[in-house]
Amino acid sequence: MLASETSNEGRETVSVENRIKEIYGELLEPRNPVRNPELIVKKLREEYRLLVDVDLVRIVVASFINGRPVMFEGPPGTGKTEIGEAILTLWAGKKAFLLPCSENYDEYRVIGDFHPLMALKHGFSEASFVPRTLLAALVLGAGVLVDEIRRSSEEFQNMLLDIIDKRRIVVPELKKVFKNNDIGFQMIFTSNPEDIAQNELSDAFLRRVIRIKFNYPDPKKEAEIVRLRLNAKARLSSTLLAMMIEAANKLREKAMHKPGPADTVEWAQLASRIAELRGSSKVEARDVLEAGRVVLTKRDEDADDVEEILAEFFGRS
Ligand SMILES: Nc1ncnc2c1ncn2[C@@H]1O[C@H](COP(=O)(O)OP(=O)(O)O)[C@@H](O)[C@H]1O
Ligand SMILES: [Mg+2]
């Protein structure tokens, strides 16, 4: 159904803005924006169960105020996507849009395109235009998490930067410029520079984004992250948890697939569930071993390293 307005002459007009509100409005879950770094950190922990340093949030907030997009760069599983999405949502007071990148993404896929049958009937008009994520975010003043930017083409990257610089989107076929000065409209890019078979980012791109490095947390912080996330009932001792994190760090040096905190969390969670299902209220080394084998071996090449490191820490069974 189209959002239509009937003008004085009784001629039907359809606006892209109204259609965007109709299609995407419900997804926004409006709330009060949170723009103070300390408060954002508090909400991230309490609402999203994400542990984030205030220094990082402060840089993001300062960049947004300066009208600059931010890029989170670092290894997989270090929270880039989840943290980015949550910060954008808190900042705008609206749920952020997620844009996963792929090689063949172009403006039609993210701004909008024309419905072929509608275009036959109405021509290239607002009635036949199907708005997509990025245009919706601009019109609604919401944030956009552009995930894995290295998987996109250089043209695509430049198009995104141009939009954020000028805070406008031009759709030539409609002879229309969409503008919005709502500072809720922001972008965070994520990128993993170690991912092979990915494109280099251009100098033009790097010049215009604020790059923030993500890395593996230190063991104390990683333990805190696992505790924040763990919700199985079986109790995991601090000693076992510390051993798991040490083992994960060893694998980060050796294995092809380097486990991130996301994997450590998954590992602890699975070990606790296995203990629970055994009817035990306490996680034991054998649960950690069993869970570790499946969570940490993402590739066959790593199986021997995983086995060796697990045996060293948790014995063989
Ligand atoms: N700082 C953190 N606070 C809470 N959980 C974290 C944190 N860093 C990583 N995680 C774990 O990783 C998951 C998110 O990883 P994700 O955002 O997909 O990482 P990336 O995008 O860097 O690959 C969370 O669900 C959680 O299990
Ligand atoms: Mg990610």
Image: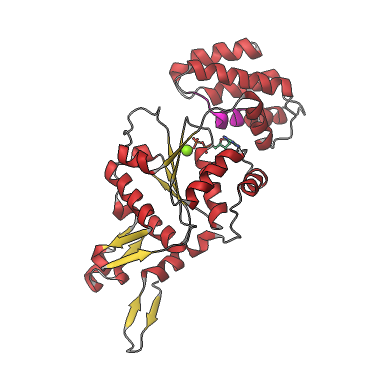
Q: Residue at x 53, y 18 (%)?
A: 251
Res 18 → quadrant: bottom left
Q: Residue at x 65, y 22 (%)?
A: 288
What colouring style does the render use?
Answer: secondary structure
With 1 as the anchor, is 286 left or right in this view? right
Tally of numbered tags: 0
Q: In which quadrant will I find the N terminus?
A: bottom left
Residue with the most extreme right position: 281
Can you tell me which quadrant of the image ligand 1 is in? top right
Q: Considering depth in this image, is 177 or 123 the residue closer to the camera?
A: 177
Q: Considering depth in this image, is 204 or 24 the residue closer to the camera?
A: 204
Residue 317 in sight: no
Judge whether residue 263 is colored magenta: yes
Give x and y (percent) for residue 13.
33, 78
With 257 as the anchor, is 264 left or right in this view? right
Q: Residue at x 69, y 18 (%)?
A: 285
With 270 as the anchor, is 192 left or right in this view? left
Residue with the most extreme bottom position: 9
Magenta residues, dominant SS class: helix
Give x and y (percent) for residue 171.
28, 62
Judge whether residue 240 is colored magenta: no
Q: Which residues are magenta?
A: 258-267
Q: In which quadrant will I find the C terminus?
A: top right
Q: Is residue 253 above or below residue 192?
A: above
Give x and y (percent) for residue 252.
51, 20
Give x and y (percent) for residue 148.
40, 39
Res 271 → quadrant: top right
Residue 233 in sight: yes
